[in-house]
């Protein structure tokens, strides 16, 4: 059935139905719920092209990735959750990849000028991120996956990166470890800075001096984890524990530990942050890996919810979330040797 027929069936005007299904904030929640329930019951699906013409919306959300070669498993899992959620509302995703910061700025300016998207999602924010001020100046709605310092409020979803690594470090210190290494991301990014801060805070709380030679930064890959772990094991005294920023870098660290003739969980304890990849479970490794855990696919889905709320007029201050991180103890951690 078309819009006019559907509206007549449920006793509302076509304009009210169209606005209810498009998320206009002036439509009462009860009316919107009534329309959506009836649409589901009667099998009504709006004509997307007509709806976009009527509402003036593009029906798409944009996301720009700098460095297409770095579009790895974390990005794909996030996009999986995001796209699944937005598809429920008939919203498309426009993805652009660029190579430089200048290219990225130009991409955002094109999106704002062309009105091809209703909002954008800003990924991997820096501690102070010029993109936030740019998007605010362009009046292009956006949500940040992560956090950053800014003069004006903005919508964001982040996890407690500080608390995650602080908890992991405290657990290892409680097991008697004093030489603890950290494999982290680039501290230009807020999440990596917060993890560094959590690591330092936990060491200080236990009276453990910080050894810069046991802190490494880089992309979350098997190769990075392997090379950094090799450099840690070359130190004297060598570390008895390591925290890896992702399951990918944890795989490389485990490989380096075994090549050195050591046993994970006995000679060297290991904790990894698990973004919950469907193809890499910490339970299935030998030994099973102790993790801090927060599913990145769920974060993508939630940001999909939040961007729709943003477009419906929800206040920015009500679209700011920091998720706690689970801590799961398994066989890769044990008491410090000796």
Image (cartoon, grey):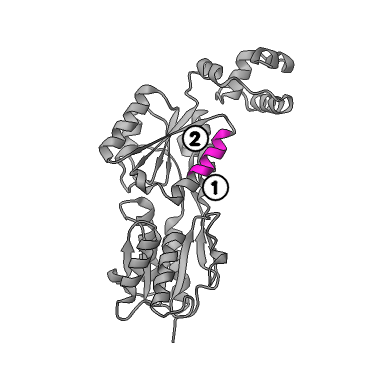
Is 57 located above or below residue 167 in the figure? above
Is 328 located above or below residue 314 in the figure? below
- Mark 2 lies on a secondary structure that is helix
Residue 137 can be seen, yes or no: no
Is 85 included in the stretch rendered in magenta? yes
Which span is picked out in magenta? 79-87
* Residue pictured at 64% horizontal, 15% vertical: 3
Q: Quadrant of the C terminus?
A: bottom left
Is 38 located above or below residue 167 in the figure? above
Say which residue label 1 marks. Answer: 298
* Label ID, residue 114: none
Say which residue label 2 marks. Answer: 307
* Residue pictured at 57% horizontal, 65% vertical: 283
**Front position in the image: 255 or 184:** 255
- Check disc 1: other Cα within 10 Å, few if <14, some if 14-19, many if 20+: some
* Residue pictured at 40% horizontal, 40% vertical: 122
Q: Position of residue 10 (x, y in %)?
A: 72, 18
């Amino acid at each position: 059935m078309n819009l006019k027929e559907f509206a007549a069936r449920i006793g509302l005007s076509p304009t009210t139905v169209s606005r209810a299904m498009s998320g206009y904030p002036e439509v009462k929640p009860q009316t919107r719920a009534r329309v959506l329930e009836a649409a589901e019951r009667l099998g009504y699906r709006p004509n997307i092209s007509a709806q976009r013409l009527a509402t003036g919306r593009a029906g798409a959300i944009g996301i720009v990735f700098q460095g297409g070669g770095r579009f790895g498993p974390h990005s794909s899992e996030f996009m999986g959750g995001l796209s699944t959620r937005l598809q429920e509302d008939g919203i498309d995703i426009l993805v652009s990849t660029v190579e430089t910061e200048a290219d990225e700025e130009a991409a955002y300016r094109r999106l704002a000028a062309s009105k091809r998207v209703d909002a954008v999602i800003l990924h991997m924010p820096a501690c102070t991120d010029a993109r936030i001020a740019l998007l605010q100046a362009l009046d292009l709605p956006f949500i940040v996956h992560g956090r950053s310092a800014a003069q004006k409020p903005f919508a964001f979803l982040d996890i407690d990166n500080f608390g995650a690594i602080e908890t992991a470090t405290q657990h290892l210190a409680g097991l008697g470890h004093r030489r603890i290494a950290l494999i982290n991301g680039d501290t230009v990014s807020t999440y990596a800075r917060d993890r560094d801060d959590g690591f330092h805070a936990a060491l200080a709380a236990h009276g453990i001096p910080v050894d810069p030679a046991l802190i490494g930064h880089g992309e979350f890959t098997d190769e990075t984890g392997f090379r950094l772990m090799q450099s840690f094991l070359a130190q004297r005294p060598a570390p008895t524990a390591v925290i890896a920023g992702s399951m990918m870098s944890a795989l490389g660290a485990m490989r380096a530990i075994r090549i050195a003739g050591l046993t994970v969980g006995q000679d060297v304890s290991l904790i990894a942050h698990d973004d919950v990849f469907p193809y890499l479970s910490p339970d299935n490794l030998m030994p099973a890996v102790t993790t801090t855990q927060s599913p990145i696919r769920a974060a993508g889905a939630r940001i999909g919810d939040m961007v729709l709320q943003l477009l419906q007029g929800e206040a920015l201050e009500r679209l700011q979330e920091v998720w706690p991180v689970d801590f799961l103890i398994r066989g890769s951690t044990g008491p410090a040797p000796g």
